Amino acid sequence: MNIKDKLKELLLNSETEVLEFKEAKNNYDFKKIGKYFSALANEANLLSKDEAWLIFGVKDDKSIVGTNYRNEGSSLHNLKKEIADKTLNNITFKEIHEVQTEKGRVVLFQIPASPRGLPIAWEGHYYGRDNESLGALNLEEIERIRTKNVEYDWSVQICTDANIDDLSKEAISKARELYIVKNHKLSEEVPTWTDITFLNKAKITIKDKITNTAILLLGNAESEYLLSPAISKISWILKDNNNIEKDYEHFSCPFILNVNEVYNKIRNLKYRYIKEGALFPDEVDSYDPYIIREALNNSIAHQDYTLGGKINVIEFEDRKLVFTNKGSFIPQSIKHVLETNAPEERYRNKFLADAMINLNMIDTIGSGIKKMFNIQKDKYFPLPEYDIKNSSVEVTIEGKVLDINYASKLSSMPDLSLNDIILLDKVQKKKKITIEEAAMLKRKKLVEGKRPNLHISSNVANCTDQKDNYIKMKGIDDGHYQSLIIKYLKEFKTGKREDFERLLLDKLPEILDDEQKKNKIKNYLQTLRRSDTVVCLKRIWSLN
């Protein structure tokens, strides 16, 4: 692209939702640039444009006046990172161009359209344009951008430069085996089909044409470039207990073969523990093979390949697996998935998901995630954790028991549903739960305290032999801590707040962090002062 010709072309147009002129003679507010970046990118998406432009050094009437904005060294191009740091998924300018004209310097910011299905937020807020006005992107527009990703199925697109020679013979052979397992009535017929006939019938190709799905699942390793800018890669990474990387390996297509290679890299050690009432230890795999298969294949099926990311399988030496993939979580919530027991109505990669179902790689009835939860629960292992943020999904699987007494006795409480156990599992791990979830647990007398500082109730503590932990989490009556302050002052006459912090920090409830504990101590002192029990002079406290 000749940027001078592009400037001439843009100057022939009036300002629109995807074109903005600014004088910016000497400077321009950074936050406003960020808002324009979000707005112009989102409007380009809505108008099905590839990009939008923000131009400095040009007045609204399209006359060039020149700009000195960041006219020193590399400060202008540092703006790329500064914008990325404040936007969702770290998206930034395609390029920042400078043009010297007879009337002065012009700066052109080339802004990409927001990714399909993903509006761009600036500092957590979505912006848009109404004619020339800058404002919040309305809910209808946000939903319109998001549904574009559902309407568009990357996995069904044809690789125009590909042919059957770009597919692995070994992968096709494996696909035939898996297809027969899924369709055993065709076991005698499938071997008579040519490769392309099989691929068409298995809904991996379309009318002999090679799809993105075909390359992803069956392509030769060297065929990965055909998917560009999408990435066909799974990375296995081994980390020690200090989060230091010790080993890694990358796997490309064909995924139908390489999922087994990834599985074989995971050190699935035996884990031994004694359940309550048993005389001999149980010996189980740290990770149930079904859970690894389900988590990995779900990552493949639901990855948003248009974002250009890869799938990660991170193994920690202290028996923990973390699976990550790019893309928003399309079902309403994990709770919804666990309660409905039905297939999702929408899929990001429907063609790919259908192909994986036909090859017996993923479940068809939507019960896979619930089965993962039940497997962990029945082993007394912590339940899977789903962290959904910044257009990515992270699933954590623990391969060990955290507290056998708590786990076994909690599982044996007959009135608890799987959802109850999931929420109590979060409370034990000090994870956030919603206001509604907290209220439900309180109604059932399963938790106490105020959100977010909830702890298990005395009822649960009694059933799970956690009475000591209950006291540590709940703490003792406020009057007890105030009496300790009074006792200190009787003994030592005076004290500073730092003295009382040293006295009480390790005695306050464990559910509170240090800052919350310090606020508690401050409140105790203020309560004692209001009751005229103590006085404070120049930050020195004493009895009244």
Image: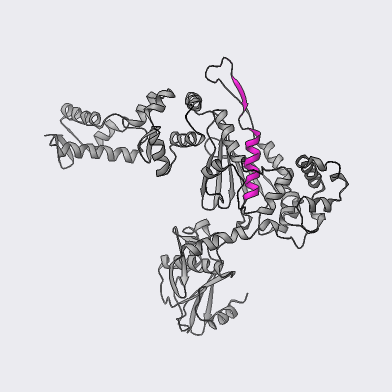
Q: Position of residue 494 (x, y in %)?
A: 16, 33
Q: Within the magenta stretch, is there residue 284?
A: yes
Question: At 43% from the left edge and 70% from the top edge, which residue is drawn?
Answer: 134
**Which of the two residues, 111 or 246, is positioned nearer the viewer here?**
111
Outermost residue, left side = 544
Q: Quadrant of residue 340?
A: top right
**Which segment is the magenta one?**
275-302
Residue 475 shown left or right of residue 193 in the figure: left
Image height check: is 164 above or below 30? above
Image height check: is 159 above or below 341? below
Q: Is residue 319 visible?
A: no
Q: Within the magenta stretch, is there residue 346?
A: no
**Which of the two residues, 105 or 41, is positioned nearer the viewer here?**
41
**Which of the two residues, 366 or 168, is positioned nearer the viewer here?**
366
Residue 11 shown left or right of residue 258 in the figure: left
Question: At 73% from the left edge and 46% from the top edge, which residue is drawn?
Answer: 358
Q: Is residue 85 visible?
A: yes
For the N terminus, give its image quadrant: bottom right
Image height check: is 59 above or below 146? below
For the C terminus, give its image quadrant: top left
